[in-house]
Image (cartoon, rainbow, N blue to C red):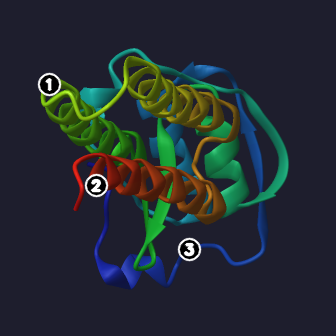
Amino acid sequence: MLAAPASVLAACTPGTATYDYPEQRLDQALQQFAHTSGCPVAVNTGALGSTQANALDGQYTAADALIRLVRGSGFEVHLDNGQYRVNHADAQALQRRIKTLTRDIDSVADAQALSKTREAALRKQLGAVWTSAQRLIREQGFLSAAEKASYNRTFAYITGQLKAAVGR
């Protein structure tokens, strides 16, 4: 974990800083980022493996620099309570929700309360959420609040469809 005490957060460079990093392993890039920006990054370095970070050259805010480093890796950048984090938290939360809804679809289908067509449509929606989320995380380095809200609306719709199917 590349972290520091709260007193170091005050040293996090406001505005922009100059970054000139070659393409390198993500763990090395995050360490270099922490030194350049003064912003600690909480990360499970063991989970990074040999993941590569993008090269970075130019003037960026800390948040933009970190996102640019992580973008394309499949990892997500989060700012939680003033602490930068790099992880898979959003993808893992979506995956758990999708697994739960898939089990719910299985149960309702086993009770023969769903037509095969409706069952297939609900499964397709879950698959589309997962595919979209993975693509956006890779492209952006994060999921926006609007994207998460959209996925949650899809999950609520599916839950409502399942409840209606069993008469609840």
Question: Where does label 1 land, which residue?
Answer: 110
Tell me the amino acid under the disc marked 2: Lys
Q: Residue at x 42, y 58 (%)?
A: 156
Label 3 sits on a secondary structure element that is: loop
The quadrant holding residue 99 is top left
Q: Amino acid at mark 3?
A: Cys
Earlier-in-chain disc, 3 versus 2: 3
Structural distance between the alpha carbons of marks 1 and 3: 55 Å
| Disc 3 residue crowd, few under 14, some 14–19, many 20+, Cα 10 Å | some
- Where is residue 139? Give x, y as percent: 69, 32
Observer able to see residue 34: no
Give SS at disc 1: helix
Q: Which residue is mark 2?
A: 163
Question: In percent of the image, x 68 and y 41: which residue is there?
Answer: 140
Q: Answer left or right for 51 relative to 112.
A: right
Q: Please indicate, yes or no, whether residue 13 appears anywhere in the rendered image.
A: yes
Instruction: Give the foreground label among 3 and 2.
Output: 2
- Mark carried by residue 97: none
Q: Is residue 15 left or right of residue 122?
A: right
Residue sitting farthest toward the right: 58
Which of marks 3 and 1 precedes in the sequence?
A: 3
Of the image marks 1 and 2, the number of the one nearer the N terminus: 1
Q: Which kind of residue does numbered mark 1 sit on?
A: Asp
Foreground disc of the pair 1, 3: 1
Mark 2 nearby-residue class (10 Å; few <14, some 14–19, many ≥20): some
Distance from Cα at disc 3 to Cα at disc 2: 49 Å
Label 1 to label 2: alpha-carbon separation: 14 Å
